[in-house]
Amino acid sequence: MDSSVGSSIPPHPLGIKPLGNKYFAGGNDARKSLGVLQLLPDEVLMQLLECLDATSLGLLSATCKFLFACCTADDIWKSIFFTTECGRASSFEWRGSWRATVLGLSPERKIRVDCSNVFSDVLHRPFVCSHISPRQYAQNIPAANKIARFPNLSYEEFADHWSKKPFILTECIQSWPVTKSWNLESLLSQYAEVVFRAEAVDWSFATYYQYLRNNRDESPLYLFDRKFVEKMSLKVGKGEGAAYWNPDCFGPDLFELLGAERPAHRWLIIGPERSGSTFHKDPNATSAWNAVIQGAKYWIMFPPSASVPGVFVSRDSSEVTSPLSIAEWLLAFHAEARKLPECREGVCRAGEILHVPSGWWHLVVNLEDGIALTQNFVPESHLGGVLSFLRDKADQVSGFDKSVRDPYGLFVNRLREACPGVLEQGLRQLAEKKRRWDAVVGEEDSSEARPQRKSAGFSFGFGFGDEDEEEIP
Ligand SMILES: O=C(O)CCC(=O)C(=O)O
Ligand SMILES: [Fe+2]
């Protein structure tokens, strides 16, 4: 572990220590009191405890210090929370931890059991991960890695030079009214009762705000809502009473031709420090912009064909496996990733907007509690890539309503009606992409050119017409 990381971690409130410390502890080991349960490794013991209810956990925690430490681990209580009445409600009182919320404990009440003879990585590691400060990873970015920053760009500059590279614009969204009127408190006063989607839960903003301001989760629940415009009655687009509008520099968004049939494309994103998005590519080969309204986000990005340390992709790229949490990836892989020549990094602050080019890998972490808006779009320069994705990776296409049976056919028809020249150019890009691919892998193995089998799905899928289930990054 990076020594600077270790030094910023406070001691565990119960005194639990990493397993390695056992060898200096002179035989004083709480695990010895576990009786027959000593046979089970910590991972298995925790899985077993996850099957218990609150009462059983309470009883078991009174038997010995090791089980006390296990039975008070907050991750177990998170699972229990979702089986309770509170867990099904959109408004409730958040008490600072899942355990305190389930048990209705007062936030001031602290556990005072000395578990300093409990040695366990399984219990200690989540504590470390929930206390790392993401800011240290955003520092000392090597000059060659820095994401380009400009005040603004014209559409011509974007189309001619920048549509395939990430960049940050520092003076592009300052005229958006929301950059002045939105902060977490103003949203709380205006939208306290509005229910937003945060991963798998639907919570009122008042409840989410309490959680955001006072939690120690390793991977905090991230508010990621695609119906925010409707829920907040916002006006999008230049004109009287507008909240915000699409920046001019990204030019026409060809998915607008799909009208009501376009896939999910805009999200309100709110989260505390440490929340964020693990490595993924955006859906349907779209590009995106991500505008920070409050807070600051650290971005680490790689071009489409790069191998990202700690991220494992199946052969047809339909499945992505990466470490469970952002904190774990930062601890284990950040230093190695930063050394790669393709690595790009940057901090996007309040009032700035970042461009994610089609196909680029990105991991994003909030350095402060904050608010952002994001939108996926299809610029002309990536039309071939999007057509190729819709046609050849039909099983990985996501975000369309169930009623749209043939997204590729629909998009081609709309392009043919509205702008046949652009379609022709996109189909040329598509043919060129296939020609280049065949030249590299040989026609036999052209997996990009064949429709893919249905698989478990890319981890950043938005679900195929599956209302809200899979809209989590
Ligand atoms: O966490 C974030 O702000 C990044 C979100 C993101 O990558 C996305 O919307 O695709
Ligand atoms: Fe993304």
Image (cartoon, rainbow, N blue to C red):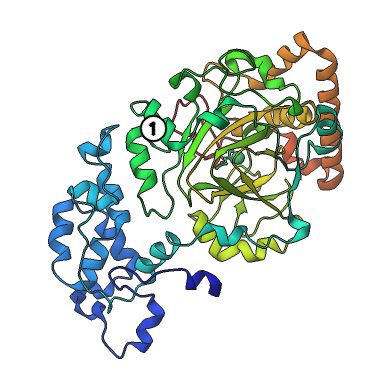
What residue is rendered at 20% in x and 37% in y?
85
Identified at 61% across, 36% down, the residue is: 291
Query: Residue 189 or 407: which is nearer the viewer?
Result: 189
Q: Is residue 1 above or below residue 262?
A: below
The answer to whether residue 276 is visible is: yes
Quadrant of the rendered image holding ligand 1: top right
**Residue 363, percent from left and from top:** 60, 49
207 relative to 9 in the view: left or right: left
Q: Nearer the viewer, residue 326 or 414?
A: 326
Residue 358 to residue 48: above or below: above
Residue lying at 61% horizontally and 62% vertically, measured from the top left:
334
Quarter assignment of residue 341: bottom right
The image position of residue 87, as x and y in percent, is: 26, 39
Q: Residue furthest top?
A: 417
Under mark 1, the amino acid is: Leu
Residue at 44% in and 29% down: 468
Image coords of residue 367 (percent x, y): 53, 51
Circle 1 sits on which residue? 188
| Residue 391 x, y percent position in the rendering | 70, 27
Q: Residues within 10 Å of mark 1 (few under 14, many from 20)?
A: some
248 sits to left or right of 279: right
Question: As displayed, is residue 108 above or below residue 451?
Answer: below
Residue 14 relative to residue 232: left or right = left
Work out whether residue 452 or residue 2 is closer to the camera in this orientation and state it: 2
Q: Nearer the viewer, residue 116 or 192?
A: 192
Q: Is residue 387 left or right of residue 175?
A: right
Q: Secondary structure at mark 1?
A: helix
Q: Residue furthest front?
A: 180
Exactly how many numbered labels are in the figure? 1
